[in-house]
Amino acid sequence: MTQTEIWVYVQTNQTSVEPTSLQLITKAKEIAVNQRVVAVMPTVVSEKLINEVQEYGPDKIITLEDDRFKTATDTEIADVLYQVVSTRKPNSLLIPATVIGRSVAPRLQAMLQTGLTADCLDVYFDGDTLVQVKPTYGDDIMCEITCPDHQPQMATVRPNVFKAVKQNNDTTIEKADFEFHPETQVKASTPQSIISSAANIGDANVVVALGRGASSPAIIEKARKLAAKLGGMVGVSRPLTDSDEFGHESQIGQSGQSIAPDLLINFGISGAVQYLVGIENAKTIVSVNTDPDAPILAASDYAFVGDANDFMDNLLEQVR
Amino acid sequence: MKIVVCIKQVPKSDSVKIDPKTNNMIRDNVEGVINPFDKNAIEAALTIRDQLGGEVIILSMGPDSYMSSLRDGLAMGADRAVLLSSRAFGGADTLATGYTISQALKKIGDVDLVLFGRQSVDADTGQVGPIVAQYLDVPQITFVEQLRMIDQHTLIGQRLLDGSTQQVQVTLPAVVTVRAELNTPRYETPVNIQSSFEKNVDVWDEHDIDLDKSRIGQAGSPTVVKRVFAPDKKGRQTKTLNGNAKKAVQELLGQINN
Ligand SMILES: Cc1cc2nc3c(=O)[nH]c(=O)nc-3n(C[C@H](O)[C@H](O)[C@H](O)COP(=O)(O)OP(=O)(O)OC[C@H]3O[C@@H](n4cnc5c(N)ncnc54)[C@H](O)[C@@H]3O)c2cc1C
Ligand SMILES: Nc1ncnc2c1ncn2[C@@H]1O[C@H](COP(=O)(O)O)[C@@H](O)[C@H]1O
């Protein structure tokens, strides 16, 4: 083989292509130096889905077509991917860090006996080495992980960090042979979409966010009032999810939710990378912190150095 | 029913700091607790045992300091615990961890159900559960928010996908990873805390388990950390709001309302 290949696992359901998969095709094309970009796509038989992937211009699409993918289990998907990956030996394999991606990837990793980095925020090539970038423990630190001696180099990549861009290309489409091995001990239903009645901070137009510097019961109550006045919701940094007041669904950040409100007001949040990656797409960011050097301030459009409680009281008074 | 819950000990909330000179984690004096999602896994195991009878075993791989989390698991009501502890296990990434745990599960033997948290809050990968499932060659249900045994051999889990839910029915043995929405972990009771000290904790090293030495610890870990760095922050044009809070709020509202 003269040219190595970078593969993207394209996740599909019956009627649509999961958006992160398309974002990863665009990203793969951007970072490929000598590599060909190949979309590998377990799918129900559907020309429409294949055409949709083609619009993003991978060099090749390998389709694995079988109507049983409608309700395939993680193991069945991993097994099918294993069949093509182990015979064609791509240099690397990018996988959306969706629930399905994060469930299939480690199973596939164990079949292939290679490395896997979870929930990357960026990837790039250094020669043939895929450098996988993700935030790590502690404060403001990112780390670069590589898998020097095993291939494929595998990474799951967080949704919505890259933009999918349509591109023209002479895409080869190849229908690959494989065997579908039904997992007989398992019966999976067709996924039912959630009619989301419960409001979600990911969809809120205004978010009032509280951190460890704004975590007293009194300020939480005020924040709820303020959010109600502004037609928004209360979100939190991770330490507050230890309290009974807030659960994981309210957490903003890398291991919580990414949010994209028109207005975000941060109270008593220091601005660790793991928090900041979740708020990058907010339109206007206002932050209040007693520490003039808190990183959150530089990441904001409006900064107030001072007490969260005091600022909150004044907002409650002045907002109509 | 023989249920094993795999737990990890993690630093309490966000007490981890990085040494700015060496870029290493400062682990001293960091209080360890059970990874929060793993408590949901313990609760799920205890609920099933209360319903169907059987035994709940806590399994963890880590240094001796992990003993405190094992005791906490026993104090919640688990029956016994196993700690995989050895220098040889150190430096393991998820692949080596998954391998080591799966070999320990084979030694425990006849396990019907292995429960994991959806992810550990420090490593944050969620990989260990599915890797173990693969090595044991059993089905998995990940990210479960509802769980019900319909008889001794059959379990139905509802998993939460991105924007949808899915019902999955499996015949045991199986691996399940759980979300916080599944349940509310019970508190340790004084009686259980007391009796936890009488419960058995086995400590196993690489000689106690059948292991391929090239697949454990650092040697068995394909990934390496190449570099640790402080990212450039995508800065915004920051406008500082001056004066007291009242003035600052006035200024802010004046600007964002236009
Ligand atoms: C793998 C991993 C994943 C993570 N994922 C996430 C995640 O998804 N989301 C997340 O949030 N964190 C996450 N974290 C944790 C993250 O690293 C930080 O520890 C956390 O965001 C800090 O929360 P904080 O800013 O509320 O608290 P702190 O860092 O303690 O900051 C509190 C701030 O409040 C200020 N303050 C104190 N008193 C006042 C007052 N009276 N008025 C105004 N300001 C005041 C202080 O100056 C300080 O800046 C993760 C960590 C790891 C290791
Ligand atoms: N060292 C360990 N010992 C036992 N169980 C572990 C260990 N590491 C991870 N786990 C389990 O695997 C789950 C996922 O962890 P992780 O892949 O690190 O995110 C955790 O919630 C635990 O249930």
Image (spheres, coloured by chain):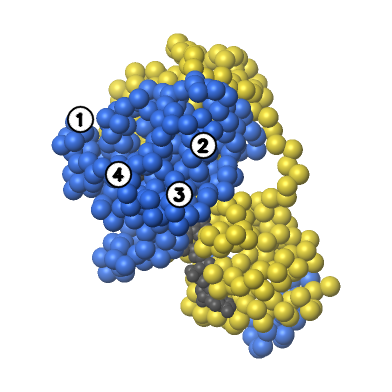
Chain colours: A yellow, B blue
Q: Which mark is residue B50?
A: 2
Q: Earlier in the sequence, mark 1 or mark 4?
A: 4
Residue at (55, 73) in percent of width and height: A213
Q: Are marks 1 and 4 on the same chain?
A: yes
Q: Secondary structure at mark 4?
A: loop
Q: Amino acid at mark 2?
A: Asp
Q: Is residue B16 above or below residue B145?
A: below
The answer to whether the residue labelled 2 contacts the one labelled 4, judged by CB atoms less than 8 Å apart, is no
> Which residue is identified by label 3?
B76
> Which residue is identified by label 4?
B200
> Which residue is identified by label 1?
B210
Q: Are marks 3 and 1 on the same chain?
A: yes
Q: Nearer the viewer, mark 2 or mark 1?
A: 2
Query: Which chain is indicated by disc 3?
Result: B
Query: Which chain is indicated by disc 1?
Result: B
Q: Cα distance, mark 2 to mark 4?
A: 20 Å
Q: Secondary structure at mark 2?
A: helix
Q: Earlier in the sequence, mark 2 or mark 1?
A: 2
Q: Earlier in the sequence, mark 3 or mark 2?
A: 2
Q: Residue B32 at x, y = what percent?
A: 37, 59
Q: Earlier in the sequence, mark 3 or mark 1?
A: 3
Asked if one can make out residue A89 in the rendered structure from this viewpoint, the answer is yes
Q: Cα distance, mark 1 to mark 4?
A: 22 Å
Q: Cα distance, mark 3 to mark 2?
A: 13 Å
